[in-house]
Image: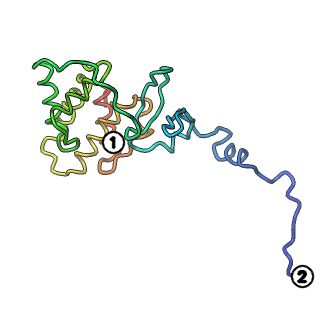
Amino acid sequence: MDGRAESSNTEGTIMGIGDWVRKAFDGRGPEMVPFLDVANGRVVRIPASELRPNAIQVKLQSTGELVWALPEQLQLGEVKHPEFDEGVREYVRRIQTAFAEHRPISFEEWEEGFRRDANPEREIAIWSHAAGIYTALTVGEPAADRRRDVYRCLVTCMNTGPDTVWQVLRPEALKRAEAEQVVNRFYGKKA
């Protein structure tokens, strides 16, 4: 050897990025999902594995397409409904009480948020369902991180579907089996 690197014929073995992706995923690419790029005002496709834990699914008003988005990048809609009657407000109070540890906002803010929804009765029913599950599963639970994970599981369920919940749900304190119990209970599935 004279100290120089030898080259060999690599014809047929040079791999482009597309070839690498196909090989890495057994000929299939990664699962791609629609994601709302708020800064550019368009929907892009990203690998599902890149979704952040707090990503939510939203339906675009313009097209009706269901896309993933980051909640902190979305703007609040206008208030669409008048103040609720006392019967509905009682449900809002129960929701506020159940989730006060994780979402410490006033009753008025809760009510206003529901009044912004296109279908506030449906949203209140969903949040009431989640509040009942949360209360049942966390009564007597001394660990704040475990209560937080139950809350995160429920919020993720409310903002995704049963087929997509695990794309963004990453419990920290709960074991996977415990988180699955929360998810199954939310969707009414048998464990």
Which quarter of the figure is the C terminus placed in?
Answer: top left
Q: Is mark 1 on a helix, strand or loop?
A: helix
**Residue at point 63%, 39% (across, down):** 29
Farthest front residue in view: 78
Residue 148 vertical position relative to residue 42 in the rendered view, above or below? below
> In the rendered structure, are the residues bearing label 2 and label 1 in contact, judged by CB atoms less than 8 Å apart?
no
Give the foreground label among 2 and 1. 2
Q: Mark 2 points at which residue?
A: 2
**Residue at point 36%, 31% (across, down):** 159
The residue nearer to you, when weighing 65 against 161, is 65
- Judge from the rendering whether residue 15 lies leftward or rightward of residue 139; answer left or right: right
Residue 10 vertical position relative to residue 24 in the rendered view, above or below? below
Compute the Cα span from label 2 to label 1: 61 Å
Residue 85 vertical position relative to residue 43 in the rendered view, above or below? above
Q: Name the residue under label 1.
A: 177
Q: Position of residue 104 (x, y in %)?
A: 19, 42
- Judge from the rendering whether residue 139 lies leftward or rightward of residue 38; answer left or right: left
Q: Is mark 2 on a helix, strand or loop?
A: loop
Q: Where is residue 66 in the image (x, y as percent from the top left)?
A: 47, 26
- Judge from the rendering whether residue 41 lies leftward or rightward of residue 77; answer left or right: right
Q: Earlier in the sequence, mark 2 or mark 1?
A: 2
Q: Where is residue 95 in the image (x, y as percent from the top left)?
A: 18, 31
The residue nearer to you, when weighing 137 against 34, is 34
Give the residue type at disc 2: Asp
Give the residue type at disc 1: Ala
**Residue at point 25%, 51% (across, down):** 145
